[in-house]
Amino acid sequence: MRWALVKVCVAVTAMVVVAFAVPLGLVIREMARDRAFSNAEREAAAIAPALSITTDRDELERVVASAGSDAGMAVHIPASDGDGDGDGRDSGSGSGGDGGGEGQQAVDIGRQRAADKDIATTRKLGRASTTEVPGGSTLLQPVALSSGEIAVVEVYVPESEVTNGVATAWAVLAGVGVALIVGSVAVADRLGVRMVQPARRLVESAHELGEGKLGARVPEEGPTELRLAAVAFNSMADQVVQLLANERELAADLSHRLRTPLTVLRLNAASLGDGPAAEQTRAAVAQLEREVDTIIRTARDAKPQTAAVGAGVGCDAAEVVRERMDFWSALAEDEGRKVRVAGVDRPVRIPVARADLVAALDALLGNVFRHTAEGTAFAVDVHNGEDAVIVLVSDAGPGIADPRAAMARGRGSGADGSTGLGLDIVSRLAESTGGDVRIGRSVLGGTEVRIWIQLDGREPVRRGHRGAVRRRRRTKLVSTFNRPRSHP
């Protein structure tokens, strides 16, 4: 927008300058020409009285010399035939004899530059004219003599005098035009900055708000439209903060309501006495209390919690799988389920928080116990590659008829009352690293949930675009995932 305004101002100002400067330059040139020929006319008129009195060559040369233009002025007096009038008016003798006179020869004073035919034409027409000569122009001015003949005064006007001051005037016009264009550019740039800066701050604040910085606001400055946009953005941001605060309060209140039944459950678990089942029940109740406390603290926190993927926050996936399988294996033994764990014999670092991985594994394994019959086998496999870690949770149950519906948040299969939140937790974990989650048929005959955790620091996948995740380069891990595995 800034450069667009500058270009528009440059174009408009340039057109205005051209529209006024070109005609003005032509007028200045014509004025200089008129000034030069007006001076020539004055010089020619200066010797006209002398020509009307005398045609003596010496007298005329003195007049031309006194005018200071002998180098550029010439006088052309035509020849005349003499005749007597016989009126007997002779001042010398006083007698009444016939008077007689001799004819006068042509007189040319000064340097002639005009052609003879041009001089003759001027003498014949009896009006001033100009003609082009080498190096400039000449003014031919006719003057009537006392004898009735027409003399022609020739005044030379050099080209330098015709163009005197024109170049300077044009340079001044060009300078004024350039100054106007530069000034318009400066004004347009300032106007552009005044418009662009508020728009840029609006964009930056929108990015900050999208990144979770809920305190991002836009100064209400600039043109009216941008001020209105800033007001609307700030109002929207305030509403987002209020909605998030209400959601946190609701989550905290709902979690706090669980404390009473948890307290009763903990007291009942304490009265179960000794034994493996009692210990497992008490451990499960203690873990549930910790999770509820974590939810309450997180919900009450005013600052949004963001995952720091690839910034030193991570865990050992093998260790977490071993720990959670120790817990779920005890329950599997009570229900007669066969369990197999693979790929956890060495550390497998992933850019995921330990608590998030624990929640994802518990969600998947809890689904196995919840949605499959007792005695159904399940397995957990961890595959470590160069750029990704794959966690497979497989079971020998009936499988999932509609994987797409199962992956939708808040919509499970519907028949068993599932909400789909467990798979959504797993999906968020994978997408935070740039990976994804796939549901398919396992070699055990039931469901296989594949969690692809990316290790190369890719941009996290945005929510709502899981179906449009681009196809990734398949490494040697793919052949490992598709290799048939033995039943536990």
Image (spheres, rainbow, N blue to C red):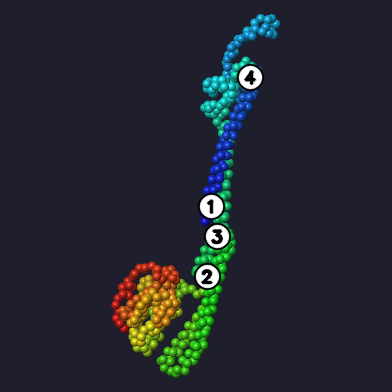
Sequence-wise, the earlier of marks 4 and 1 is 1
At a point 34% along the width and 84% down the height, the residue shown is: 377
Marks 4,2: beta carbons within 8 A? no
At a point 57% along the width and 49% down the height, the residue shown is: 183
Q: Which numbered circle lies on residue 6?
A: 1
When the figure is inspected, residue 10 is found, relative to residue 389, above or below; the finding is above
Q: Amino acid at mark 3?
A: Gln
Residue 227 lies, in percent from the top left, at 58, 62
Sequence-wise, the earlier of marks 3 and 1 is 1
Q: Which residue is mark 3?
A: 197
Q: Amino acid at mark 1?
A: Val
Q: Is residue 244 visible to us here?
A: yes
At a point 49% along the width and 88% down the height, the residue shown is: 262
Sequence-wise, the earlier of marks 4 and 3 is 4
Measure the C-alpha gap from mark 4 to mark 2.
101 Å
Measure the C-alpha gap from mark 4 to mark 1.
67 Å
Measure the C-alpha gap from mark 1 to mark 2.
35 Å
Marks 3,1: beta carbons within 8 A? no
Residue 137 lies, in percent from the top left, at 55, 28
Front-most of residues 289 and 144: 144
Instruction: Give the secondary structure at mark 3.
Output: helix
Q: Which numbered circle lies on residue 213?
A: 2
Marks 4,3: beta carbons within 8 A? no
Q: Residues within 10 Å of mark 4 (few under 14, many from 20)?
A: many
When asked about the image quadrant of residue 128, the answer is: top right
Q: Residues within 10 Å of mark 3 (few under 14, many from 20)?
A: some
Q: Is residue 200 left or right of residue 46?
A: left
Front-most of residues 486 and 421: 421
Measure the C-alpha gap from mark 4 to mark 3.
80 Å
Instruction: Give the secondary structure at mark 4.
Output: helix
